[in-house]
Image: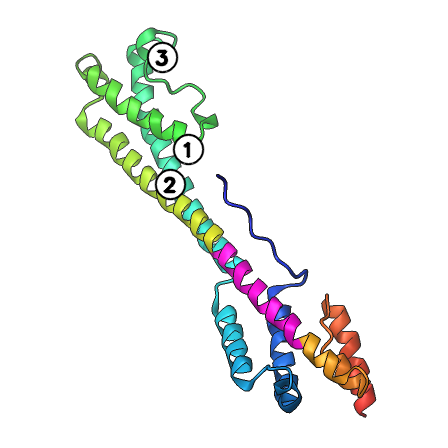
Amino acid sequence: MKKQAVHRQYNFPDADLYLQCIERIKYAKRDIKQFEKYGYQLERLKQFHNMCEKFRQLPDDDELVGDQMLTTEKKYTAAEKLKSAIRSIMTRVAIKFNNRSGRYRKFGTAKMGDMTDAQLLFCGRRVVRVARQQIDFLADVGINENAIKRVSDACSVFETALNIQQDKVADRDIAVERRIQQGNKLYQELVVLCNIGKDIWAEVDPVKYENYTIYESNNDQKIARKEREKNES
């Protein structure tokens, strides 16, 4: 069964979530006596703060994408070296045999530029295998074990680069899922804290009530901040 995708429960950036959590923790510390009447103790507030710090230290998607791009570039470089080694073999094969002949076609290098990574890797291995089978016929055009080994080595380097790149893709998927899960936990705790805070001040102090409003965007936060500053001045 396919694993169900994890979705964010909040619709603003992770950085905003972190800042909103830290700001509300500050207000809750100020109002801790009232919070304790709801069973929300200082220890729980400290645990919430620790969760925030762990969340802040998680790598963000820019870091993960950067790592993935570096491994992808290395894979492309390895692919080009493999293609170059294959072309060197096929240039010699074309000299010996017509490029429409069965012996040429047996190498299976047609439309190499359009091949997927997996197809290119299989192509390289096939070139090595077929070249060794026909090495006696191709010796006079310069195909020897060294030329074949160049393709074989290029296959190994490309396969390694491909595996590393795929691992980085998987690592990113796992890290993104972990970040979403941790973010959702923070958001859930933020909602609990803010609901308590609003209930405390609903009939008492509108400014402090506003302290516990969760904003959906930076613009909302800026407007609220200006309003607070105006009220406090």
Name the disc covering residue 176, or none.
none
Whether residue 202 appears in this view of the structure is yes
Q: Residue at x 44, y 54 (%)?
A: 67
Name the disc covering residue 105, or none.
3
Q: Earlier in the sequence, mark 2 or mark 3?
A: 3
Instruction: Please name the residue that numbered disc 1 is placed on.
Output: 117
Report the span colored magenta.
175-193
Evaluate if marks 2 and 1 touch, with contact meaning CB atoms under 8 Å apart. Answer: yes
In front: mark 2 or mark 3? Answer: 2
Image quadrant in which the C terminus is located? bottom right
Separation (CA) of disc 1 from disc 3: 20 Å
Q: Which is the main secondary structure of the residues drawn in magenta?
A: helix
Q: Residue at x 61, y 81 (%)?
A: 25
Whether residue 15 appears in this view of the structure is no
Amino acid of disc 1: Asp
* Residue 7: image location, x then y, percent: 60, 53
Instruction: Please name the residue that numbered disc 2 is placed on.
Output: 162
Q: Is residue 178 magenta?
A: yes
* Residue 127: image location, x then y, percent: 29, 22
* Residue 194: image location, x then y, percent: 68, 76
Q: Residue at x 73, y 66 (%)?
A: 217
* Residue 113: image location, x then y, percent: 46, 27
Q: Quadrant of residue 29?
A: bottom right
Task: Please say if 186 is above or below 37.
Answer: above
Q: Is residue 77 magenta?
A: no
Amino acid of disc 2: Leu
Identify the secondary structure beneath mark 2: helix
Label 2: how many Cα within 10 Å (few below 14, some 14–19, many 20+): many
Q: Quadrant of residue 232?
A: bottom right
Q: Earlier in the sequence, mark 2 or mark 1?
A: 1
